[in-house]
Image: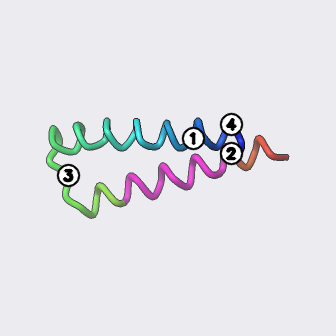
Amino acid sequence: MDGGLILLVFLAFLFAWGLNRVRRAFRLGPVGYVGVMVVFVIAMLLVWGQTKL
């Protein structure tokens, strides 16, 4: 497995943990939570894709 991909997975778990705390603070609903996670996943895949070029 690629080291950069492992780092991205770790960052995704860290981001999800932090987002869960922020979601409780701002009282985001499930739709807002899913929206933020989708944007994060797309952004991380784009960053990872740039490193492969």
Contact (Cβ within 8 Å) of mark 2 with mark 3: no
Question: What residue lies at 53% left-to-right and 44% top-to-bottom?
Answer: 9
Dot 2 falls on a residue whose secondary structure is helix
On the image, numbered disc 2 is attached to which residue? 48
Q: State which tag comes first along the sequence, 2 or 3.
A: 3
Q: Position of residue 15 (x, y in %)?
A: 40, 39
The residue indicated by pointer 1 is 8
- Mark closer to the chain start, 4 or 1: 4
Q: Secondary structure at mark 3?
A: loop
Three-letter amino acid code at the position of disc 3: Leu
Disc 4, disc 1: CB below 8 Å?
A: no
Q: Residue at x 47, y 43 (%)?
A: 12
Q: Amino acid at mark 4?
A: Gly
Depicted 28 relative to depicted 8: above or below: below
Residue at mark 4 = 3
Query: Is there a contact, CB below 8 Å, between mark 1 and mark 2?
Result: yes
Q: Amino acid at mark 2?
A: Trp
Q: CA distance from mark 3 to mark 4?
A: 33 Å
Q: Is residue 38 magenta?
A: yes
Question: Residue at point 36% right, 44% down?
Answer: 16
Specify the segment rendered in magenta: 35-48
